[in-house]
């Protein structure tokens, strides 16, 4: 059972044991510590010293030298007694729950043999545990851990933190979340002139997607205060439960970068590591999209250390302004938190602004000159975000191709919808782009593909046996995909009137969701395998006809307040005779073996009764009903926004003496289940995808072609016949004709049950 001492007789008395700490004990410890965000690990290993060993430091040292450590783990290398740090405490381990970023670095340091033995790892741990501790026992728990540790790290920078590599120094300096994973920290010293740290540090290995975990057991020799620590580190491989660890906020970094980096971009020479410079150019930097979404997203990614370094940001627009003025306009949308001012200053220094015209090649040459003029500019990877109206796409992309392409790195182009106005204009744009760039360089962004629950669709479908067998026409009666907004155009109707609700929402957001719900299982999670299946299902959908659609336009509510009193035509930017729909419902039929006969209903609108985006899969009625018609249809509902959730609506017996039935749900509400997990914004996910070279959540040219094929005939008929939309009152459910068409297509709306978001 025990492992003999390296150079002592196996008959020496046992003075300690290497044992495992069970997971429920850790959970209890974390609960007592009062942490709100804890990175829990299944088990720990620590050195158990019997309380009988208490005494002076010298007598305890002699005690250790005269015995051996018993090994209960099976595979641990022998531990020499003199290498165990002396302590008069009966329990002298440090319990540390940490983040995978620290874990990955530690694992790489050990595996690569960098530094002197385990010095990089233990230097980092030394900084966090603050070896310069006075007294016999120090307990730091819960909420005050970050401030206490950071304060002490600052005080000991020369003696401790100076040993850290620049990459880690930057993390310690800039990232508060770096310490939020600490559950309980116990520091012990044995003498005012000695500083000791003994600990057990458990880290997920960088291959943790395979559920492999490793523990590192460290012991430190006594040392005078101020001298570098001397550690001996042993690696053990206990058998842990096969489950992923919970993630604390910010638990991404290198692991996330690796998981997002596409393995199929080698033809483009994708590279992320090694300090390759990156340049991010925002064309249309003075516009609403840049101000409200792009710059705030870049700031969040920079703040969380998710962007490669070095990096620079260039804004380009026709408006004459300084970079300071531009960032000042963006700041209200950046959600700046206390303590982030220094990072924001660093972010601001990396930003530049150039005034130029989109149709002037000379201005793009000046942009290229500015990029090349900075350190590493010639070899920098370049990303161009076209936050521009479609009317200037062709000119701008030609100038990028002729004047601004990366000379040694890669170039990627992000294009915002609308991708054309109809099938012909979209085909023309796609052909134009294909002459300038490869398909793998083009990222057509649909921000709905970056939303958590949309990305979760594949996992729900293909990762759960409970759903797959019923995901077909034998069990499903109809599918309703909804997008509802409780506000109107409110002064922006001039822009909206050019496109209407079908082009703005249905032809892109809702159809993309439909393709994920209805597609067959892809061969792999390779982006092209997924997009191939999406294209296949779109090809099975016939063009929509007007008879299968309902169009509406909101009017003011005479009893409403504020904007609710105003209709669409009351917007001063909208033509008074406009027939542009602000509400649309269309029924699509998929001619495939899986879905033949199942109506897919797409519904979207402005100025409705609530804000909601969801997928509602309604199942067939129960055959052979024995409850006299009481049962209502089961539904699987995937709530995209607000309040991400997945719930199954079902029938259950009403509690009590009667045998009545009522509707209820099995509920997975993310806000309750994942209280401490920050959901990234959709643009955060997608921009990081672009940097990492993953096109999984972007629209391919053939997907776009099929989408326009489905909707163009309907759009042309609406415009040619000047189809008058049905009026509906601001704040209502929409035209009653829409509910009637749903009912006609086997979707039953009962109105007797409403899901309520659970309280925290």
Image (cartoon, rainbow, N blue to C red):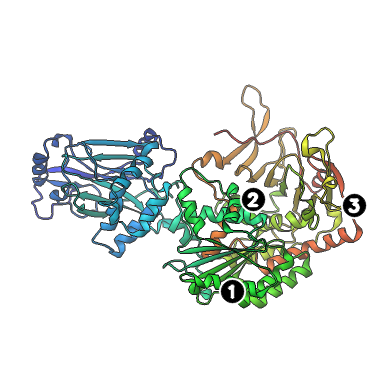
Which secondary structure, mark 2?
helix
Q: Residues within 10 Å of mark 2 (few under 14, many from 20)?
A: few
Which secondary structure, mark 3?
loop
Q: Position of residue 356 (x, y in %)?
A: 65, 67
Q: Position of residue 149 (x, y in %)?
A: 33, 43
Determine if residue 342 is in view: yes
Q: Is residue 480 left or right of residue 413?
A: right
Q: Is residue 309 above or below residue 666?
A: below
Q: Position of residue 118 (x, y in %)?
A: 26, 58
Q: Position of residue 662 (x, y in %)?
A: 67, 31
Closer to the chain start, of discs 1 and 2, is 1
Which residue corresponds to the image point at 74% horizontal and 68% vertical from the top-left? 426
Residue identifier under label 2: 470
Q: Is residue 238 left or right of residue 597?
A: left
Q: Which mark is residue 520?
A: none
Determine if residue 731 is in view: no
Task: Check whether the beta carbons of the residues at disc 3 and disc 1 lie within 8 A of each other.
Answer: no
The span from disc 3 to disc 1 (Cα, nearest Å) is 44 Å
Task: Check whether the beta carbons of the residues at disc 1 and disc 2 lie within 8 A of each other.
Answer: no
Residue identifier under label 3: 577
The span from disc 3 to disc 2 (Cα, nearest Å) is 48 Å
Closer to the chain start, of discs 3 and 2, is 2
Q: Is residue 548 left or right of residue 251?
A: right
- From the image, state whether disc 3 or disc 2 is nearer to you: 3
Which residue corresponds to the image point at 91% horizontal and 59% vertical from the top-left? 721
Which secondary structure, mark 1?
helix
Quarter of the image where the C terminus is located:
top right
Residue identifier under label 1: 404
Closer to the chain start, of discs 3 and 1, is 1
């Amino acid at each position: 059972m025990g492992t003999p001492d390296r150079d002592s007789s196996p008959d020496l008395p046992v003075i300690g044991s290497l044992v495992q700490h069970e997971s429920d004990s850790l959970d209890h410890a974390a609960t007592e510590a009062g942490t709100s965000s804890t990175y829990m690990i299944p088990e720990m290993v620590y050195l158990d010293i019997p309380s009988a060993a208490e005494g002076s430091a010298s007598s305890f040292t002699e005690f250790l030298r005269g015995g051996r450590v018993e090994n209960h783990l099976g595979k641990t290398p022998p531990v020499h007694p003199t290498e165990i740090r002396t302590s008069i405490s009966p329990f002298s381990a440090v319990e540390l729950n940490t983040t995978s970023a620290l874990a990955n670095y530690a694992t790489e340091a050990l595996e690569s043999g960098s530094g002197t033995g385990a010095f990089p790892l233990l230097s980092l741990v030394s900084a966090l545990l603050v070896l310069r501790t006075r007294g016999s026992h120090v307990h730091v728990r819960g909420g005050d851990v970050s401030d206490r540790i950071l304060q002490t790290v600052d005080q000991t920078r020369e003696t401790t933190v100076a040993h850290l590599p620049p990459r880690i120094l930057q993390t310690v300096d800039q990232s508060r979340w770096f310490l939020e994973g600490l559950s309980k920290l116990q520091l012990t010293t044995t003498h005012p002139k000695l500083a000791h740290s003994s600990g057990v540090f458990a880290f997920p290995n960088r291959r943790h997607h395979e559920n492999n975990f490793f523990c590192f057991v460290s012991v430190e020799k006594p040392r005078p205060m101020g001298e570098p620590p001397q550690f001996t580190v042993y690696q053990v491989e206990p058998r842990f439960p096969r489950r992923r660890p919970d993630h604390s906020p910010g638990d991404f970094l290198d692991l996330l970068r690796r998981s997002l980096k596409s393995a199929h971009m080698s033809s483009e020479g994708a590279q992320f590591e090694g300090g390759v410079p990156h340049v991010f150019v925002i064309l249309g930097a003075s516009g609403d999209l840049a101000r409200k979404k792009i710059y705030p997203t870049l700031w969040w990614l920079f703040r969380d250390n998710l962007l490669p370094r070095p990096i620079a940001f260039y804004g380009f627009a026709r408006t004459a302004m300084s970079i300071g003025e531009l960032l000042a306009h963006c700041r209200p949308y950046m959600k700046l938190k206390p303590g982030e001012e220094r990072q924001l200053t660093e972010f601001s220094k990396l930003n530049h602004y150039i005034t130029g015209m989109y149709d002037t090649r000379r201005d793009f040459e000046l942009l290229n000159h500015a990029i090349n003029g900075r350190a590493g500019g010639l070899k920098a990877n370049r990303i161009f975000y076209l936050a521009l109206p479609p009317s200037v796409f062709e000119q701008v992309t030609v100038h990028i191709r002729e004047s601004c392409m990366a000379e040694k790195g890669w170039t990627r182009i992000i294009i915002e919808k609308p991708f054309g106005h109809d099938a012909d204009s979209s085909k023309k744009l796609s052909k134009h782009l294909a002459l300038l760039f490869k398909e793998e360089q083009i990222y057509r962004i649909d921000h709905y593909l970056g939303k958590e629950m949309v990305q979760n669709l594949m996992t729900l479908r293909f990762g759960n046996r409970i759903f797959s067998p019923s995901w077909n026409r034998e069990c499903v009666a109809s599918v309703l995909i909804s997008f509802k907004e409780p506000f109107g155009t409110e002064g922006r109707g001039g822009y909206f009137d050019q496109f209407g609700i079908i082009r703005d929402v249905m032809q892109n957001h809702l159809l993309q969701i439909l393709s994920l719900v209805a597609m067959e299982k892809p061969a792999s999670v390779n982006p092209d395998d997924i997009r191939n299946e999406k294209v296949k299902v779109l090809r099975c959908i016939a063009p929509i006809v007007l008879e299968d659609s309902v169009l509406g336009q909101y009017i003011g509510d005479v009893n409403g307040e504020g904007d609710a009193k105003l209709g669409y035509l009351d917007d001063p930017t909208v033509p008074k005779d406009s027939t542009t729909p602000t509400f649309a419902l269309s029924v699509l039929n998929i001619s495939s073996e899986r879905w033949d006969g199942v109506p897919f209903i797409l519904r979207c609108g402005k100025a409705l009764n609530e804000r909601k985006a969801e997928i509602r899969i309604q199942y067939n009625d129960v055959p052979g009903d024995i409850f006299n018609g009481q049962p209502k249809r089961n539904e699987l509902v995937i709530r995209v926004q607000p309040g991400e959730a997945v719930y199954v609506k079902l029938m259950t017996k009403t509690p009590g003496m009667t045998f009545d039935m009522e509707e209820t749900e099995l509920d997975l509400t993310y806000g309750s289940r994942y209280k401490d997990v920050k959901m990234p914004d959709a643009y955060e996910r997608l921009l990081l995808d672009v940097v990492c070279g993953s096109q999984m959540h972007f629209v391919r040219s053939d997907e776009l072609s099929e989408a326009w094929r489905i909707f163009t005939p309907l759009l042309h008929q609406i415009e040619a016949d000047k189809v008058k939309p049905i009026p509906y009152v601001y704040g209502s459910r929409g035209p009653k004709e829409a509910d009637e068409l749903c009912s006609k297509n086997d979707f039953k709306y009962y109105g007797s049950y409403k899901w309520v978001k659970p309280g925290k």
